[in-house]
Image: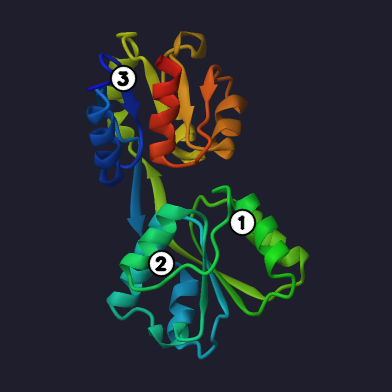
Amino acid sequence: MVMPLKGKRILITRDEKQAKEFADKVLQSGGTPVEIPLLQISCKGDEAIKKLRQTRETFRWLFFTSVNGVHCFFQFLGNGAIDNAFLADSKFAAVGRKTAQALESHGYQADFIPSTYSAEAMANEFFAIYPCIEEPVLIIRGNRSRDVLPLWLDKQGIHFQMVEVYETGYRFSEKDNLNAILKQYDLDVMTFTSPSSVDAFMEMKEVPVKNLPPSVCIGTTTEARASAFGLTNLLVPNEFTIDGMLKRMEEYYE
């Protein structure tokens, strides 16, 4: 059996709840996952969630930009924080395949998925297919989400609302573990699955950038954030998924 990552030590920085799938795939490819979760995702509704409980408005489109957004939103539905009757005539846009699969796990199908898993592609391709979008629109997001979609909708003059259903925080308790690993200089590659994971890493790391190993970024947005901090030797997969990251690492070491 070919194991392209045999003997390679891979740093996994994503949220602890989501790290296991990534770590298992690294093991299957022969690598050694080094799990140091720098992010903590927690479901947390803002004031807009409370307003949804009282609204009678039917949203024609719901935009989900992450798996976390899907699960936290439907958690609020499940605990009665939101009356889900307003979803009866809604359509759903998912930023990527994993987000669409998360929707399916809650009994809903994505009506739109962009070819590239990014907010920019989501906005541009959606408008190309639906130039006369039905209103109003609901954007489900986290506290660190970028403003690409709301700015795009606002520019188009489209009526929309936003709700924050999860919060991304830094796990500073992992700072010592992170630096102990980095100072051993035996990592072969680091992985970043969001701009937030890059931010958390740079906030905590004590090793000079020039001494760091190559980094695999899940997409071009994460790559741009890493590059802005001076990280070099950045690898980006063709498909912006965990599987795509694994394939890119395997190609690199082959």
Q: Is residue 147 visible?
A: no
Among the two numbered marks 2 and 3 on one chain, the one whose residue lies closer to the N terminus: 3
In-front residue for pair 229/137: 137
Q: Nearer the viewer, residue 168 or 96?
A: 96
Side of 174 where 216 appears, left or right: right
Amino acid type at circle 3 is: Leu
Quote the CA–CA distance across marks 1 and 3: 33 Å
Distance, label 2 to label 3, CA atoms, is 40 Å
Residue 141's place in the image compared with 170, above or below, is below
Q: Secondary structure at mark 2?
A: loop
Please tell me whether mark 1 or mark 2 is closer to you in this view. 1
Q: Residue at x 44, y 42 (%)?
A: 241
Tell me how far mark 1 sits from mark 2, CA to CA: 24 Å
Identified at 39% across, 56% down, the residue is 68
- The three-letter code of the residue at mark 1 reads Met
Of mark 1 and mark 3, the one earlier in the sequence is 3
Q: Is residue 84 visible?
A: yes
Q: Is residue 132 left or right of residue 148?
A: right
Residue nearer the viewer, 159 or 216? 216
Label 3: how many Cα within 10 Å (few below 14, some 14–19, many 20+) = many
The residue labelled by disc 1 is: 122
Q: For mark 2, what is the residue?
A: 45
In the picture, measured across the screen, residue 203 lies left or right of residue 134, that is left
Which quadrant of the structure image shows residue 40?
Answer: top left
First in sequence: mark 1 vs mark 2: 2
Q: Position of residue 105 (x, y in %)?
A: 31, 66
User: Where residue 22 appears, x then y in whole percent?
Assistant: 30, 37
| Residue tagged 3 | 5
